C-alpha cells in the first residue's frame, strides 16, 4: 500500500481519477490544477509542508506528483490543512466541506468556480478515500 | 475594484465567513454588473451551517458588503442548512428567484425545504434583500 503523502500514492490517485466514469462525467467542465498542502508534522516524519499537485482537465488527471513550494503555489487552487486533518479526510472520518466551513481547511482560488463543481470535488474526495493507504505516522 | 467593496470582519472570522466573502468577492470581480445588487436598503441575512453550529451575518449597507462571524447579530432573513446544502445552494437552477422545479437540482432543493433540511425565515417580508444576497452568492450564471 502506498504511503500518504508520496509520489506513489499520487500515482494511485491519478489512476483512480482516470478510471472513474463518474468523475469524468461530473468534471467534464472542470479546468484547473490543485495543490494540496499537507502541513508539516514532525510526528509523521516531515518537518516541512508537503505539496501534492494534481493537474485536472475536463474529467481526467493529466499529472499528479509532489512539487516544491514555488511550483505548488502556482496552481489555480491551493488547499491547505494540517496532516492530521488530511488523514481524517482520507480515512472517511471528516467531510472536507464541513472542515472548510469550520475554517480548518483553507482554500485559495476561484471559490465560486469550485463550488459550481462541488459534485466533482466530492467525487475527488471519494476516490481518495477509496485508495488503500498507509500513513507516515503509523 | 469592486472586490474592495467586500470585507470579512471580526476578531476571528470563521471559515464560513471567509468562504462566503470569497464567493461574493469573486463574483463581483468576474461579473462587475452584480455591483448593482449592493444598491438598496440596508439589511442583514444570517446564514447558519446547522451541522457544525457556525453562523455568519451578511450585511448589505451603503453600497458595500460586510461578512462576519456571529449568532447574536439581529438579522432580517435567516437561512439555515447543513454545510453540504449551503455549498450547493448557489448553483441551484432558479426561476423567478426560486429553485426551478423542472430541474433535478431545483427539485432536490425544494424537497429539502419541505423536509425542513433547509430553513428560511423572513423571506416573504424581505424578499428583495434575500434576492440581492442570492445574486451575490450565485454560481454558474453568466
Image (cartoon, coloured by chain):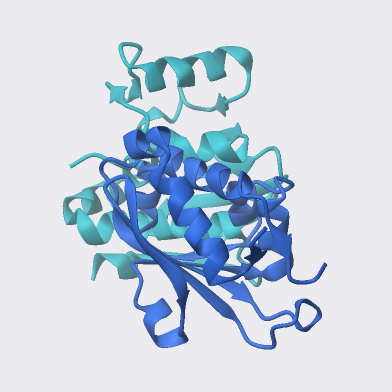
- Which one is in front, A33 or B81? A33
Give the answer, above or below, for where A69 lies relative to B42: below
Foreground: B23 or A5? A5
- Indicate the quadrant containing the C terminus of chain A: top left, top right, bottom left or bottom right: bottom right
Closer to us: A70 or A67: A67
Q: Residue furthest front?
A: A1
- Which chain identifier belongs to the cyan chain? B
Compared to A27, does B97 lie above or below? above
Q: Position of residue B35 (x, y in %)?
A: 24, 54
Asked whether, in this view, residue A20 is left or right of residue A92, the answer is left
Q: In the rendered view, does A136 fall on the left or right side of B24? A: right
Numbered-mark total: 0
Image position, residue A29 (x, y; %): 25, 43
Is residue B42 visible to the viewer in this orientation of the structure?
no
In the rendered structure, the colour chosen for chain A is blue
Query: Image quadrant for the N terminus of chain A?
Result: bottom right
Side (left or right) of B71 relative to B64: right
Percent from the top left, x then y, of residue B122?
53, 27
Q: Name the residue rendered at 62%, 35% in the picture.
A: B82
In the rendered structure, the answer to whether residue B26 lies left or right of residue A23 reads left
Quadrant location of residue B74?
A: top right
Residue B10: give x, y in percent of width and height: 60, 68
Height in image: B91 above or below A130? above
Q: Is residue B49 visible?
A: yes
Q: Quadrant of residue B83?
A: top right
Amino acid at each position: 500500500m502506498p504511503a500518504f503523502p508520496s509520489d506513489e500514492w499520487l500515482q494511485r490517485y491519478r489512476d483512480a481519477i482516470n478510471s472513474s466514469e463518474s468523475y469524468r462525467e461530473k468534471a467534464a467542465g472542470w479546468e484547473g490544477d490543485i495543490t494540496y498542502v499537507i502541513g508539516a508534522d514532525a510526528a509523521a516524519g516531515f518537518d516541512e509542508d508537503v505539496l501534492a499537485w494534481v493537474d485536472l482537465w475536463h474529467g481526467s488527471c493529466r499529472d499528479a506528483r509532489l512539487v516544491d513550494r514555488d511550483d505548488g503555489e502556482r496552481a489555480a487552487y491551493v488547499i491547505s490543512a494540517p496532516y492530521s486533518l488530511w488523514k481524517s479526510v482520507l480515512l472517511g472520518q471528516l467531510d472536507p466541506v464541513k472542515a472548510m466551513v469550520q475554517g480548518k481547511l483553507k482554500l485559495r482560488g476561484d471559490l465560486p468556480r469550485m463550488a459550481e463543481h462541488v459534485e466533482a470535488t466530492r467525487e475527488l474526495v471519494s476516490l481518495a478515500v477509496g485508495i488503500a493507504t498507509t500513513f507516515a505516522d503509523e | 475594484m469592486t472586490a474592495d467593496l467586500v470585507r470579512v470582519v471580526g476578531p476571528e472570522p470563521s471559515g464560513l465567513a471567509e468562504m462566503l466573502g470569497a464567493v461574493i468577492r469573486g463574483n463581483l470581480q468576474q461579473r462587475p454588473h452584480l455591483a448593482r445588487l449592493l444598491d438598496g436598503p440596508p439589511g442583514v441575512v444570517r446564514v447558519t451551517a446547522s451541522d457544525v453550529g457556525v453562523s455568519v451575518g451578511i450585511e448589505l449597507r451603503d453600497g458595500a458588503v460586510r461578512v462576519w462571524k456571529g449568532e447574536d447579530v439581529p438579522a432580517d432573513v435567516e437561512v439555515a442548512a447543513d454545510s453540504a446544502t449551503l455549498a450547493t445552494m448557489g448553483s441551484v437552477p432558479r426561476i423567478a428567484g426560486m429553485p426551478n422545479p423542472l430541474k433535478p437540482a431545483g427539485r432536490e432543493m425544494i424537497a429539502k425545504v419541505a423536509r425542513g433540511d433547509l430553513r428560511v425565515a423572513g423571506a416573504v417580508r424581505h424578499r428583495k434583500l434575500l434576492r440581492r444576497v442570492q445574486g451575490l452568492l450565485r454560481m454558474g450564471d453568466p
